[in-house]
Structures are given as structure tokens and as C-alpha cells.
Amino acid sequence: MFVLGIDPGLSRCGYGVVEQRGHKQRARAAGVVRTSHTDNTPDRLAELQVEIRSLIKDFDPAVVAVERVLFQTNVRTAMGVGQASGIVMAEAITAGCKVVEYSPNEIKMAVAGDGSADKDQMEHMVRLLLNIATPLKPVDAADALGVALTYLANHGVPAGMGA
């Protein structure tokens, strides 16, 4: 089973694909979809849509897990994150994937066991849980893998999958 985790953003949208076989989890892909701040918003959203559609086609995830933004001090950033999140969820549903959302605190609790964990702690725990030796850069990729791990931590091993 594949889970696609998304850390939504219009300038940088982190993605991470985690495969679970039995009780074993491994990262299959992680990265960032970038759009240029000099392009207009509709073009940037279309570019993000194409990239998300391609990720879903390539990995055929059962679930797309998205980090939910609860608060942003910068309204423009919040709008972009919301728009990017909407694109991701619409593409996932259209492709037949289950979609779930998690708050930042839920993700931090599931991955690090601490709802106040910082970015460095989260990146370290993601690498530890997925046995990744090299640092994950940019941090948006680690965040996205953390979102996928949160789904797996909350839903365990699907029925019929042995150890």
C-alpha cells in the first residue's frame, strides 16, 4: 500500500510517498513541487495540478494525506496554501484515492510523540522511522513524509496484511 503525504504550498508543495508492506514502511519518493512567484496564480495552480496528477498516476496511492493549515499570520500565504490544498484533494478524489487531513499537532504527535516538536526534531524522526541516512532537504519533503507516516500510525496495518 502506498500513502502520498502532502505538505501543501503554492511556492513549495512537499510530497512524500511511503510504502507499507506488512509492518514495514519505507520511503519511495520525496521532494518538492515548486512554482515561480513571478507567475500568476492560475498558472501556478495549473502547474501544481499537473505535478500532483503525475505523482498520483506514478504511485497509485490508496490514500492521500494532507497537512491542514489551521492558522497563518500572512493572509496571502494562507490563501496560497488553501488553494494548493484544494488542488491536491480534488486530484486525489478524482483519481479514486481516499483523502485525509491532519493538523500540524496531530502530525507532530504521531511522528515525534510531542505536539510541540520543531522542524529539526520532525526531520530527524522521519529519517529514523524510515531508515533514511541523509538529511531531507528541503524540509517540506520531510514534512510530507511525516504526514504519510501519520496516516499509517493512525490506521495501522490493513486487514489481511501479515507481518
Image (cartoon, grey):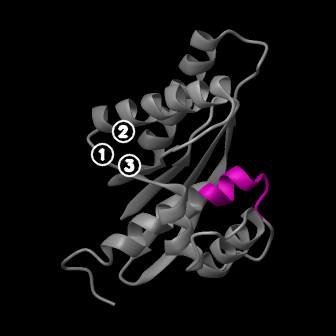
Front-lying residue, 43 or 67: 67
Q: Residue 56: x, y in percent?
A: 43, 42
Q: Residue furthest front?
A: 73
Q: Residue 151: x, y in percent?
A: 40, 64
Give, as a three-letter code, the residue at label 2: Ala
Q: Residue 161: x, y in percent?
A: 26, 80
Give, as a three-letter code, the residue at label 3: Asp
Task: Decide: is 21 above or below 65.
Answer: below
CA neighbours of label 2 inside 10 A, class few (<14), some (14 to 19), many (20+):
many
Q: Earlier in the sequence, mark 2 or mark 3?
A: 3
Q: Nearer the viewer, mark 2 or mark 3?
A: 2
In the rendered structure, the answer to whether residue 80 lies left or right of residue 134 reads left
Q: Residue furthest left?
A: 160
- Residue extent of the magenta highlight: 136-143
Q: Earlier in the sequence, mark 2 or mark 1?
A: 2
Q: Residue at x 76, y 62 (%)?
A: 136
Q: Residue at x 59, y 76 (%)?
A: 114
Query: Could you tell me if the residues under marks 1 and 3 are in contact, i.e. CB atoms within 8 Å?
Result: no
Quarter-wise, where is residue 132 in the image? bottom right
Q: Which residue is mark 2?
A: 92
Q: Main SS type for the magenta part?
A: helix
Task: Decide: is 12 above or below 97.
Answer: above
Q: Which residue is mark 1?
A: 97
Quadrant of the frame with the N terminus: bottom left
Query: How far apart are the alpha carbons under marks 2 and 3?
Result: 10 Å
Q: Which residue is mark 3?
A: 60
Give, as a three-letter code, the residue at label 1: Cys
Q: At numbered mark 3, what does the secondary structure look like: helix, strand or loop? A: loop
Q: Residue at x 48, y 61 (%)?
A: 148
In the rendered structure, the answer to whether residue 76 lies left or right of residue 20 reads right
